[in-house]
Image (cartoon, helix red, strand yellow):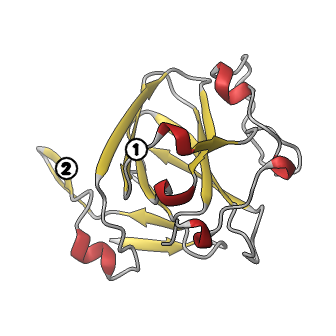
Amino acid sequence: MNVVETSIEGLKIVEPDVHGDARGWFAEQYNAERYAKFGITARFVQDNESFSSRGVVRGLHWQAGDHAQAKLVRVVSGAVLDVAVDIRQGSPTYGRHESVELSAANRRQLFIPRGFAHGFIVLEEGTLFSYKCDNLYCHESERGMRFDDPDLGIEWPDLGMELKLSERDLAHPAFRDIEPWSCEKGAGE
């Protein structure tokens, strides 16, 4: 397994070992002991999946307060451009983001610590996206911000089509209007 540190502390790209032969391939998608050696010590308690068509944008989302979540995300089929934005109060990289293509072909994963907004754009039809979360979802704690806020400087790909977003995601506030995430609010890592 290879773990790539990004330019934002705590955010990591994971490249699992893949063992293949004439029958196909095998890859261990998660092993708590192995991941802990690379600083990924979250205890995952919930798994989620989303299935989306090309041009769907999901995000940017996070859970506030005691319901904050660290996530380990990957694509089972298809491809996305995955984005994590640092919203940790006082962080030297506050407001910065990392983008990484996750696909069934490259088998990469992204570990997103608590204190990040997360979202993605679907690049291929019929994409299945998988999330491991270290805390249970709470509707009242869900927060979001505009995926296309120019202050964030995210370079979303031009797919040559109208993007598909939920009404809720279209109504999210701008980055400058969100409350920064703070571990003092009960959401410690």
Residue matched to label 1:
105
Look at the picture and state if 40 lies above or below 168.
below
Q: Name which residue type carries label 1.
A: Ala
Q: Is residue 147 in sight in this rendering? A: yes
**Residue placed at 47% from the left, 54% from the top?**
67
The disc label shown at residue 142, or none: none
**Residue placed at 32% from the left, 63% from the top?**
16
Of callouts 1 and 2, the N-terminal one:
2
Pinpoint residue 123: horizontal percent, then vertical percent.
Answer: 57, 31
Residue matched to label 2:
25
Along the horizontal axis of the image, is 118 left or right of 139?
A: right
In front: 161, or 178?
Answer: 178
Q: Is mark 1 on a helix, strand or loop?
A: loop
Report the quarter where the N terminus lies. bottom left
Q: Name the quadrant containing residue 95.
A: bottom right
Q: How crowded is mark 1: few (under 14 residues within 10 Å), some or many (20 or more)?
A: few
Q: How crowded is mark 2: few (under 14 residues within 10 Å), some or many (20 or more)?
A: few
Q: Is mark 2 on a helix, strand or loop?
A: strand
Q: Is residue 164 in sight in this rendering? A: no
